[in-house]
Image (tube, coloured by chain):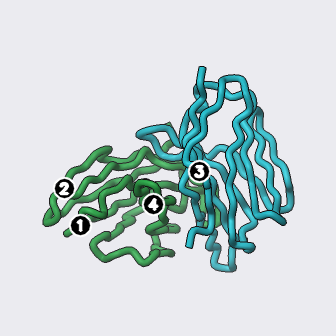
Chain colours: A cyan, B green
Amino acid sequence: DQQVKQNSPSLSVQEGRISILNCDYTNSMFDYFLWYKKYPAEGPTFLISISSIKDKNEDGRFTVFLNKSAKHLSLHIVPSQPGDSAVYFCAASASPTIFGNEKLTFGTGTRLTIIP
Amino acid sequence: ETGVTQTPRHLVMGMTNKKSLKCEQHLGHNAMYWYKQSAKKPLELMFVYSLEERVENNSVPSRFSPECPNSSHLFLHLHTLQPEDSALYLCASSQDWANTEAFFGQGTRLTVV
């Protein structure tokens, strides 16, 4: 059972336009969400996160929106640049228990290609 | 450079071989992780070490054996693997086990023949 879903395996966007990557989750216990970016032959790199107490978090060109009622989050990149071409993973975790267990659950990733 | 280094970058091994993957971090982190990334599947958490003690083992077959001799090093010992174990194995570290922002290594691309 996939608790974090990225239904679009790939996305192509013109340079300068907005890229919107989507992620859906099913576990209502998730309250912390992250986006990772992965270039070929490299490990994922943390990009941006959002806690469930917020519905928006912005960092430069990157903004993550969270819709808790829809169990949906999205990553907006604007303006898109060629260097943004990568695979983007959505990840989620639930609040730590007293044992500190905050296992991340990842989606399958979306390959973003920015067209010059 | 993320501060997490994995070696080797690529490994081809037969099903009867024994090999080890190595991960090293110089970030002063207390938690280290092994993840498996198979094609078209989510990243799978395999093992978690916190302060050199294994705190999580996600039903990983015994042919994968982790070792954490100190807080900077993590190994994954491999023996009698199957072709379906071919994947990208990623090591990560975080400040502590409760910190969900992890730094990943570049991964070891493993092919079992």
State the residue position of label 4. Answer: B35
Question: Mark 3, mark 4: which one is toward the viewer?
Answer: 3
- Marks 3 and 1: same chain? no
* Few, some or many residues within 10 Å of mark 2 (<14, 14–19, 20+): some
| Disc 4 to disc 2, C-alpha distance | 19 Å
The amino acid type of the residue labelled 3 equals: Phe
Q: Tell me the kind of residue under disc 4.
A: Tyr
Label 2 resides on the chain identified as B
Label 3 chain ID: A
Q: As displayed, is residue B29 above or below residue A99?
A: above
- Do the dots labelled 2 and 1 sit on one chain? yes
| Marks 3 and 1, how far apart at CA | 27 Å
Which element is circle 2 on? strand
According to the image, label 3 marks what residue? A89
Residue kind at label 2, given as amino acid type: Met
Q: Mark 2–mark 1 contact, CB under 8 Å?
A: yes
Q: Amino acid at mark 1?
A: Leu
Q: What is the quadrant of the N terminus of chain A in the image?
A: bottom right
